[in-house]
Every structure is written in C-alpha cells, then in structure tokens.
Amino acid sequence: MKRRLVLVTVGVMAITALALAAAAAAGSRTVTTRGDEVLRVNVGVNSTLRFSPGPLTVAVGESITWEAGDKIGAPHTVTLTRNPDALVETFLEFIGIEPCAECDAALGAAFGGHFPDMAAPVLELGLGDGFGDDGDSFLFGNGFPPSVTVTLENVSPGETVFYFCAIHPWMQGSIEVQG
C-alpha cells in the first residue's frame, strides 16, 4: 500500500512538473526597470537604474515584456547585441574618454535609429523582420509605450544575446534561449 502511494505521488509530481514547464514555455517573461537617480550637488550622482531580472532564460517562441517601473520615469531602450564586448563596463567608456569601439558602435546604432535629429526624437522599433538581430532596438516608458512585448526571432537554441539601454548603458542584461 505504501509503495503504491509513493508511486502515485511521484507520478503526480512528474505530471505537475511537466505541466508547469509547458506553461512556462508558452508563457511570457517580464523584465521591469527598477531604481532611481539622485543628484547631490558637489557630492555626486547615484544611479541605481537597472533591468530586473538581469539574466533571463527563455524557451524558443516565448515572449518577453519590458515594462517601465523605475522611480524616475525616464524613457529606456532595449538594444540587442550578440557581442558582450559591446556592453559598457566603465564610466570612462560611457562618457567616451576610454576608447571602446564596440560600445561606441552599439550606442551609435541605438541612438541613430531613435534620435536621427536630436531635436525631435522619433520612435523606430526596428521590429519589421522580428526582434533578435544585432542592433534591434525599441523605446519604451515616459512618452512612449509603457511596455513592449516581443518574441526573439533569428536566435538559435543555446545562444545568448545581450541587451542594454542606450540612454542608461549601465542597465544591461542577457537572454539565454533554450530549445
């Protein structure tokens, strides 16, 4: 009797685990902006802006929603790259004192699409052929859609892509695609 109960319990647990995995694969993941920026005159600027969660694992075909949730209400971009060297790592890279050709190229591509005329920001989603190629980028938050949902295309199982905000390039994350 105990053996049968154990087998039934194990069977139910296995079926539940499979059902949860299938639901997650067909579902959606959400990445939210978090944090704040504080300026203290003659002291410094403290920015805790970030994407939460940073690293993300998704199944092929699973959608991802980016939504604004930080305290400053600024617009943000999500800009993709397959090259982790394109991510800003230091403040000196961010302000352009320390050379970083990959960072400059990624930031230039992101800003070039969104702000061709800096006096009149233009929203260009770059989603015409799917979202998943290097340089694909979209704006969301403050004056733009409060959230954007995409499904990664042109990304193979086992591949990892990286993303960052071109406006606040220290906001970074990665997406691992599982088969």
Image: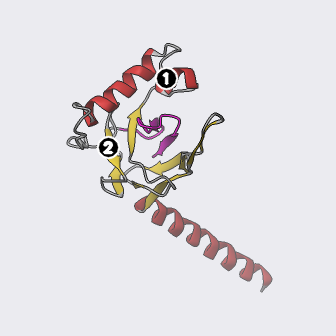
- Drawn side of residue 110 relative to residue 86, left or right: left
Crowdedness near tag 2: few (<14), some (14–19) or many (≥20) residues, C-alpha within 10 Å? many
Q: How is the image coloured?
A: secondary structure
Mark carried by residue 34? none
Q: Quadrant of residue 6?
A: bottom right
Was residue 157 drawn as part of the magenta stretch in this picture? yes
Task: Return the residue nearer the eye: 53 or 7.
Answer: 53
Q: Identify the residue shown where x is 44% and y is 41%.
A: 157
Q: Residue furthest front?
A: 42
Q: Identify the residue shown where x is 77% and y is 86%.
A: 1
- Drawn side of residue 158 relative to residue 115, left or right: right
Q: Which residue is mark 1?
A: 95
Looking at the rendered structure, the kind of residue marked 1 is Ile
Per the rendered image, the range of residues in magenta is: 155-179
Q: Which residue is mark 2?
A: 138
Looking at the rendered structure, the kind of residue marked 2 is Phe
Q: Identify the residue shown where x is 31% and y is 42%.
A: 131
